[in-house]
Amino acid sequence: GSALFVWLRRLPHDRNLGVVPWVAWLVGAVLITGVLFRHVIVLAPVWLTDTSALIQAVLILGFIAATILARESFYHRPLWLQLLVGATMLYLSATAIVTITTYLGNLIGGNTGMHLGFLIGHATVSILWMVIAAVLMLHRSLLEQSGALWTGVGLAVAGTVKLVFFDLVALSGVPRAIAFLLSGLALLTIAAM
């Protein structure tokens, strides 16, 4: 996926293939990671303890890093494609983070550690989305001026939706409390600035 991305990015402007390769690239990423994501959201962390799941999660992080490093490639693309890229990166980040924390939890603490790692992974995703939203909204120099604000707003909305509709049901105990407290602090920071 990352190699295709680099190839698409280096195409000369006169050989630009439009948005079709980018959409195919994103759809391919979602299809390839679909099984992993299904186990992330249906609260079935046992499959996430397999080494192949960890390898996929690490490759997903590489894919996300390549996309972030080359984000300028999307600045002059249609808005719907930029939104699709953003939504795909949220999907992939949740998949990778929850998978890695579940795997590490199982490695450290067996079955109990697996479940704790799963909860910590989901809490981490929510907190991370809120913190990144706060950074983007408060330091717009990190992205294009016009794009940073709306990217931050989108992340804050996605994080809030995840907190209310998923984490409230899926998380319990200390991970849920930490996710809600730190996400709330990030939102208060945004509002105060």
Image (tube, helix red, strand yellow):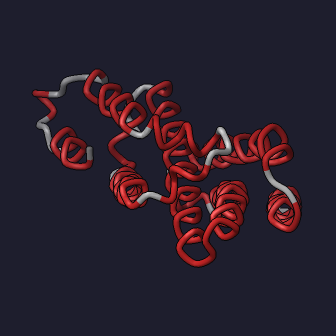
Q: Residue 81 is drawn in which quadrant?
A: top left
Quadrant of res 10: top left
For image coordinates 37% across by 53% down, the residue present is 56
* Residue at x 58% of width, y 62% of height: 102
Q: Image point 35% across, 59% down: which residue?
A: 55
Location of residue 171 in the rendering, given as x and y in whole percent from the top left corner: 80, 53
Decide: is 44 above or below 59.
above
Which quadrant of the figure contains the N terminus?
A: top left
134 vs 55, left or right, is: right
Viewer-proximal residue, 24 or 49?
A: 49
- Say whether residue 170 is left or right of residue 136: right
Which residue is outermost to the front? 111
Q: Position of residue 3 (x, y in %)?
A: 19, 48
What is the x, y in percent for residue 63? 35, 52
Relative to 14, is 18 on the left or the right? Answer: right
Q: Does any portion of residue 108 appear in the rendered image?
A: yes
Is the residue 145 above or below the residue 34 in the image?
A: below
Relative height, residue 135 to residue 91 (above, below): below
Question: Residue drawn 66% across and 70% down?
Answer: 113
